[in-house]
Amino acid sequence: MSVFAGLIGQNHIIDQLTSAVSAAKSRTGSQAMTHSWLFVGPPGSGRSNAAVAFAAALVCKDDGCGSCVDCTTVISATHVDVERFNPSGLSIKAEEVRELIARSSWSPSVGGWRIVIIEDADRLTETAANALLKTIEEPESHTVWLLCAPTLSDVPVTIRSRCRHVQLRTPSTESVQDFLLNNTKVDKKTAEFAARISQGHIGRARFMATNSEAQSRRKEILSLAISLRDVDSCFKAAQRILDIAEEQAEGDNAERNAQELKQLQDAYQGTGRGMISGGAKAVKDLEKEQKSSATRAVRDNIDAALLDIATFYRDVLVMQSKGSEILNIDLQQEILNHSGTTSSKRTLEQIDAVLIARTNLGRNAAPLATLEALFCALK
């Protein structure tokens, strides 16, 4: 199966990418291929998957067959000539970009290309973007840069003006549902439910469909938003959502953090004072990086919770407008009841409050204070 088969609802870009692969292999000088690409699309549309599939097709002898060693190692992030950089912190720093640039100049080991994929390129700091600019302008002849970001405006104009743009779309509910039915063991009802509430976010749809804990967390988050009555309930709800986000981040990262620490200790031949020279500093740097990663994970989890809350008010507005296409089909009665207790004008104000909170969170506002202010505005 082709590596491009996993791009759900993105048929419009597959021709563009396959043409580029053909041009790269033929070496005819066709304008279909270039050395710098920018994949943009809403969260969950699969922009990183598209970049990985493109990289696999470039290094595969059969243009992305999906089954050879080159394809499977690119997809599993172990190919020697394809580097995937997924920032663990809140931003991508200049020193990290300089390290990528240094490695990108190495000659390919097994294929014709050295490929660097930067996920979340919107997290580039100004100095990091400036460090990357010259390389994007004048890359090595054997190097391809693949950047990923939500929108073009999230990337500095100096960077995006020097890249070929690939615009992904939000997959339809039907295509996400078909994907779940074909790639997981869930039943049709669960697939439909997960496809609806994910709003085209494929990764979230799969996670929600196959993870009962995620389903329980979602129900608790929505019940907290529905139960707001006074300032005390708002503050308690804010603290609980922060606790849920932190618990989820700790659960998701604990095993990986322990494995990283063990690998580092093995490399420095011991623990504590038994480590060889430089070990203590390496452990301290790792702990700092893991703390930054945990902070980002907590913020991402809170943002996902706010999206769930926004869908509730979206459904209330649909009911108030005499519509029927709601997303949270498991909360139909609650949505109907809530729609009769408020006006559509007030519902729009509540949706705006959630969106403002998401924006503030993205600007590094304090999570608890942001949630407290939001819930006081929603009650």
Image (tube, grey):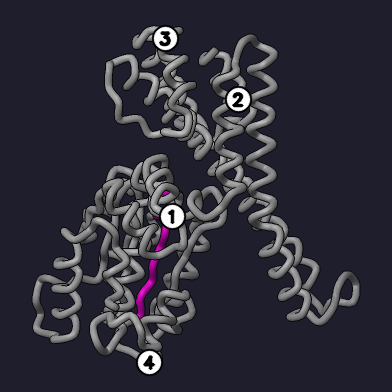
The magenta segment = 114-125
Residue 222 lies, in percent from the top left, at 54, 29
Q: Which residue is mark 2?
A: 224
Task: Name the mark nearer the viewer: 4 or 1.
Answer: 1
The residues tagged by marks 4 and 3 sit, at their Cα atoms, a distance apart of 65 Å
Whether residue 106 is visible here, answered yes or no, is yes
Residue 340's label in the rendered image is: 3
Residue 103 lies, in percent from the top left, at 45, 77
The residues tagged by marks 2 and 1 sit, at their Cα atoms, a distance apart of 28 Å
For marks 2 and 3 on the same chain, the one whose residue lies earlier in the sequence: 2
Residue 69's label in the rendered image is: none
Judged from the image, the secondary structure of the residue bearing numbered disc 4 is loop
Q: Which residue is mark 1?
A: 187
Q: From the viewer's side, name the closer residue of 142 and 349.
A: 349
On the image, which quarter does residue 147 sit in?
Answer: bottom left
Can you say whether 62 is above or below 278 in the image? below
The residues tagged by marks 4 and 1 sit, at their Cα atoms, a distance apart of 43 Å
Please, what is the three-letter code of the amino acid marked with disc 1?
Asp
Query: In what quadrant of the picture does the C terminus appear?
Result: top right
